[in-house]
Each structure stands twice: as structure tokens, then as C-alpha cells.
């Protein structure tokens, strides 16, 4: 259970930097450093670093296999996708400010898990759905932070 809470705190950090200061919480610099390490680990594992910058800048989600696996890696590191490749974005409700619970619930309700041929494809298809449902939130609050 402690590992789950740590993963949820780390997931909160991914979103934290773009939440206005008056809505955010103080985050321990050690945790911020850990999130950055996990991001670098996923970039190194997948080779997505070259594609990420253009993707975020242009607000496009390329079908590049490295991007797909980077998304899966990040979700996996944060405990938001399980071993059967089922998304658990609702787990963020435990750690995110109440102001965005409605947004998270909307994404979960509209998208659930969009099954792909493997874990990387499932993460990608689900993020693609999140963007279709609420692209502004995904690009401005989420992808900018992990990209």
C-alpha cells in the first residue's frame, strides 16, 4: 500500500507544475527529483526523447512506437496501468486537488481503457481518447509535464 501511495504522489507531481500556485501543494524536492529520474528512465528505455519535443510543441500525438512505449512506461511507473494493461486514471483522485476531480472522472467515464495490441498501444490509444475528450487539459496540464 505504501508503494501505491508513493506512485500516486509521483503522479501528482506530473500534474503539479501546471496547477496554479494557489491550488497546488508544497512538494518535497526529493520527490520532484525522483519524478524526473523516472521520466529519464522511460526516455532512456524507449528512445522517445527525440520525438517528445516536437510532439509537445506541435500538440500532436505521433504514432511512433517509442512514444507509445514512453506513455506506457510513465503510466506503469506511476501505477496507473496494471499488468493486464487496464488503465486506472481514477487512482489520481486520491492525490489531486478536488478542482480537477470532475475532469479526471470525465476522462475515465468517456475513455476507460482503449485496448491496443499490447501495453504500449493500449496506453497510446487511451491517451488518444483523453485528447479527443479534453485535449486542452491533456496538452496543457499533463503532456507538457511529461514531455
Image (cartoon, rainbow, N blue to C red):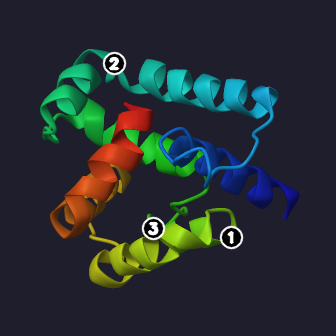
Q: Badge 3 local density, few (<14 within 10 Å), some, or many (20+)?
A: many
State yes or no: discs 1 and 3 in contact (Cβ < 8 Å). Answer: no
Quote the CA–CA distance across marks 2 and 3: 23 Å
Q: CA distance from mark 2 to mark 1?
A: 30 Å
Res 115 → quadrant: bottom left
For image coordinates 34% across by 19% down, the residue present is 47
Residue at 31% over, 24% down: 48
Q: Position of residue 83 (x, y in %)?
A: 54, 62
Name the residue tied to disc 3: 87
Q: Residue furthest top?
A: 50
In the drawing, does residue 121 fall left or right of residue 109? left
Nearer to us in this view, 141 or 49:
141
Please tell me which of labels 2 and 1 falls first in the chain.
2
Instruction: For label 1, count other residues whose C-alpha is less than 10 Å away and answer few (under 14), some (14-19) or many (20+).
Output: few
Q: Which residue lies under the disc numbered 2? A: 49
**Badges 2 and 3: C-beta atoms under 8 Å apart?**
no
User: Is any part of residue 136 visible from this angle?
Assistant: yes
For the question of whether residue 125 can be seen, the reply is: no
Circle 2 residues within 10 Å: few <14, some 14–19, many ≥20: some
Nearest the camera: 73 or 108?
A: 108
Q: Is residue 128 left or right of residue 99?
A: left
Q: Position of residue 98 (x, y in %)?
A: 60, 73
Which residue is located at x 38 percent, y 26 percent? 46
Please tell me whether residue 61 is drawn above or below residue 111 in the rendered image. above
Q: Cβ–Cβ below 8 Å for labels 2 and 1?
A: no
Which residue corresponds to mark 1?
94
Amino acid at each position: 500500500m505504501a508503494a501505491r501511495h508513493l506512485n500516486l504522489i509521483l503522479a501528482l507531481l506530473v500534474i503539479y507544475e501546471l496547477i496554479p500556485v494557489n491550488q497546488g501543494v508544497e512538494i518535497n524536492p526529493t520527490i520532484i527529483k525522483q519524478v524526473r529520474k523516472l521520466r529519464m528512465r522511460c526516455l532512456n528505455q524507449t528512445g522517445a526523447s527525440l520525438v517528445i519535443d516536437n510532439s509537445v510543441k506541435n500538440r500532436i500525438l505521433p504514432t511512433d512506437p517509442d512514444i507509445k512505449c514512453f506513455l506506457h512506461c510513465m503510466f506503469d511507473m506511476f501505477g496507473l496501468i496494471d499488468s493486464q494493461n487496464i488503465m486506472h486514471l481514477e487512482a489520481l483522485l486520491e492525490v489531486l486537488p478536488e478542482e480537477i476531480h470532475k475532469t479526471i472522472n470525465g476522462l475515465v467515464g468517456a475513455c476507460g481503457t482503449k485496448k491496443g495490441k499490447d501495453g504500449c498501444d493500449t496506453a497510446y490509444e487511451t491517451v488518444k481518447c483523453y485528447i479527443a475528450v479534453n485535449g486542452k487539459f491533456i496538452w496543457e496540464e499533463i503532456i507538457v509535464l511529461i514531455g
